[in-house]
């Protein structure tokens, strides 16, 4: 077959893929995506707690430019619970928290009788906590090196694979140093250079927890910090001649709602905290009472407070898509938007702690909506799309990297809103 013929056929196949209502994802090694001589480069950036509408505050000119040039979603809908570890891991697996097993930031695993928490370095680095196949594992197996800097799960060996480049999470590493490390990895010669990299910035989440999501000098300052980090990244790519060939996918994990000392549910008003075994507190309660105490705790809490929904694990409403994993607590409490769950002693210790912002609530609330901006050769140009759930992005990233996706819950048809079918590489 002539090169021209091959090119025409590949082009037709791509056209059919793009037009089909239920397109099939390209097979691994297919020539039509991510196939230029040196391979694709995708940088996934997470701006923790960056609510979708923070982009409209005029504090983030670099992000606004990327959004105008590439794909910008009205909002990225997180998965329930709208917390950091569950959602970061959903983004890289295409599985929802009840499917991958990171069902909260604080988890009790009944099988191993172990606790998971963000400051528990051993747990965070232990592969057994992470179900599913993160995209860096798929990529490494295909010979694409990866560098998921500070991404939840990146420190662990998962399915026998570790990313080629990774570092233990260090919240004190400056945004500039993080960007410079990514740029340094990109300077490696092609066999060692990673094709999938990530960046993570917690500044906006920190500020919005303390000062709330409404406009303030402090939140504006944090928005400026992450925007300058993005500018440093883009300039660094330009200086290395990589700007045109790198795909940037900028997301956040969830949004943020305002809290108030006037809206605090005191758990010890209703139950004896000793018998309830509270594994996670706010704003989603995870209770693991002993068998003997289970019914008593449930009955004391169900309907006790008009802004707290308390359900047994079997009764969690379907719309949360939060069922079927043994790590889901037997009793779950979900506070209404803007309400906090605490105890009298914690409130006495720090009344100001409830005058800011938090997240974790019903993932479909607008206030929990996250950011999605995608710019680069694989993404559509100057395209606005409507709200999209975060578990679809895994398939989009697989297309950009030319990977066969692992089984996941994303709908392949959704990714064509984002991804541009590329010119086939005819090998000439
Ligand atoms: P959240 O309140 O759910 O948004 O959690 C945000 C916090 O998660 C950050 O302030 C960090 O302290 C923590 N965090 C983020 N990434 C990591 C990581 N890779 N390892 C450990 N902790 C992390
Ligand atoms: Zn977060
Ligand atoms: Zn947070």
Image: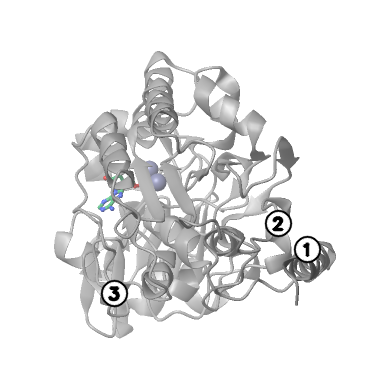
Question: At which x and y percent is residue 135?
Answer: 44, 66
- The residue carrying mark 1 has its beta carbon less than 8 Å from ligand 2: no
Residue carrying label 3: 161
Give left or right: position of 372 versus 206.
Answer: right
Residue carrying label 2: 421
* Cα distance in 3D space between marks 3 and 1: 35 Å
Instruction: Pick the quarter of the image with the C terminus.
Output: bottom right
Please report whichever mark, 2 or 3, sits nearer to the chain's N-terminal start: 3
> Are there few (<14), some (14-19), or many (20+) residues within 10 Å of tag 3?
some
Dividing the picture into quadrants, the one containing residue 146 is: bottom left
Relative height, residue 225 to residue 340 (above, below) = above
* Cα distance in 3D space between marks 2 and 1: 9 Å
Question: At which x and y percent is residue 262?
Answer: 44, 32
Residue at the image position 38 percent from the left and 75 percent from the top: 141
Q: Nearer the viewer, mark 2 or mark 3?
A: 2
Looking at the image, can residue 343 be seen? no
Looking at the image, which is closer to me, 263 or 26?
Answer: 26
Looking at the image, which is closer to me, 78 or 238?
Answer: 238
Q: Secondary structure at mark 1?
A: helix
Dividing the picture into quadrants, the one containing residue 56 is: top right
Looking at the image, which is closer to me, 151 or 364?
Answer: 151
Instruction: Pick the quarter of the image with the N terminus.
Output: bottom right
């Amino acid at each position: 077959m002539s090169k021209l013929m091959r090119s025409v056929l590949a082009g037709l196949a791509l056209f059919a893929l793009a037009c089909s209502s239920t397109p099939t994802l390209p097979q691994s090694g297919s020539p039509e995506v991510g196939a230029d001589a040196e391979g694709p480069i995708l940088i996934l950036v997470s701006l923790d707690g960056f609510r979708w509408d923070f982009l409209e505050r005029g504090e983030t000119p670099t992000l606004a430019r990327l959004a105008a040039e590439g794909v910008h979603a009205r909002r990225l809908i997180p998965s329930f619970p709208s917390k950091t570890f569950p959602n970061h891991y959903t983004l890289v697996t295409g599985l929802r928290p009840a499917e991958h097993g990171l069902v909260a930031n604080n988890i009790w695993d009944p099988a191993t009788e172990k606790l998971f928490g963000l400051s528990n370095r051993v747990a965070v680095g232990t592969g057994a906590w992470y179900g599913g196949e993160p995209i860096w594992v798929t990529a490494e197996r295909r010979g694409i090196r990866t560098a998921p800097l500070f991404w939840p799960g990146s420190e662990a060996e998962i399915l026998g694979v570790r990313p080629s480049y990774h570092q233990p999470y260090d919240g004190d590493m400056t945004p500039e140093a993080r960007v410079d490390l990514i740029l340094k990895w990109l300077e490696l010669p092609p066999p060692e250079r990673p094709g999938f990299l990530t960046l993570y910035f917690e500044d906006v989440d920190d500020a919005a927890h303390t000062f709330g999501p409404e406009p303030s000098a402090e939140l504006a300052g944090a928005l400026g910090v992450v925007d300058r980090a993005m500018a440093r990244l883009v300039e660094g790519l330009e200086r290395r001649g990589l700007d045109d060939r790198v795909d940037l996918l900028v997301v956040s994990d969830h949004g943020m709602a305002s809290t108030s000392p006037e809206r605090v549910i005191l758990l010890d008003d209703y139950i004896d905290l000793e018998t309830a075994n509270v594994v996670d507190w706010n704003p989603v309660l995870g209770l693991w009472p002993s068998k003997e105490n289970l019914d008593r705790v449930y009955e004391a809490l169900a309907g006790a407070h008009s802004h707290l929904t308390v359900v047994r694990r079997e009764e969690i409403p379907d719309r949360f898509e939060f069922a079927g994993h043994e790590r889901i607590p037997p009793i779950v409490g979900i506070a209404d938007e803007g309400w906090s769950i605490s105890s009298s002693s914690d409130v006495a210790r720090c009344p100001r702690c409830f005058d800011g912002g938090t997240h974790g609530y019903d993932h479909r609330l607008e206030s929990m909506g996250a950011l999605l901006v995608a710019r680069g050769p694989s993404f559509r140009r100057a395209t606005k799309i409507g709200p999209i759930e975060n578990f679809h992005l895994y398939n989009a990233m697989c297309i950009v990297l030319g990977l066969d996706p692992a089984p996941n819950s994303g709908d392949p048809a959704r990714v064509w809103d984002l991804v541009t079918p590329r010119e086939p590489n005819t090998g000439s």
